[in-house]
Image (tube, helix red, strand yellow):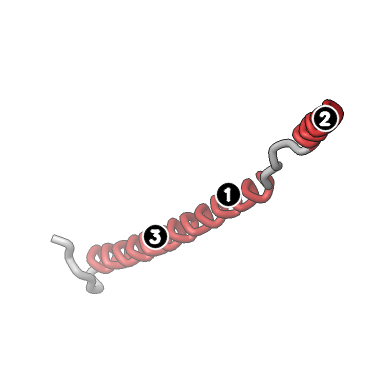
Amino acid sequence: MKRLILSLALVAAFSTSFVSCRDTNKKADDVEDVTDDVEDAMDDTGDAIEDAVDDTGDAIEEGVDEIEENTGTGGTDDM
């Protein structure tokens, strides 16, 4: 009886010492997080470029109108 209990205790001790907490796949999670961050940054950059293009177009149109007003060839007054 002692040997049976001792054997079970030994098996329990070995099983807990050789099987530890599972290693979660943190590398895959980190890669997914980085990928999401990169996608967000790309979207933000695309939006910023579109805004800059719109602002540049507006500035060019205002410049053309200003030149036309100053030269007397037309244009609209912004008053």
Circle 3 packing at 10 Å, graded few (<14), some (14-19), many (20+), is few
Quarter of the figure that contains the N terminus: top right
The dot on residue 33 is 1
On the image, the x and y values in percent for residue 52 come to: 41, 58
Q: Looking at the image, which residue is at 70% across and 42% down?
A: 22
Q: Is mark 2 on a helix, strand or loop?
A: loop
Q: Which residue lies furthest to the bottom in this view?
A: 74
Q: In which quarter of the image is the C terminus?
A: bottom left
Residue at the disc numbered 3: 51
| Label 2, residues with CA under 10 Å away: few <14, some 14-19, many ≥20 | few
**What is the CA distance from the residue labelled 1 to the residue labelled 3?**
27 Å
| Side of 38 where 18 appears, left or right | right
Of the residues shown, which amino acid type is indicated by label 2? Met
> Which of pointers 1 and 3 indicates the residue nearer the eye?
1
Q: Distance between the residues labelled 3 and 2?
A: 82 Å
Earlier sequence position, callout 3 versus callout 2? 2
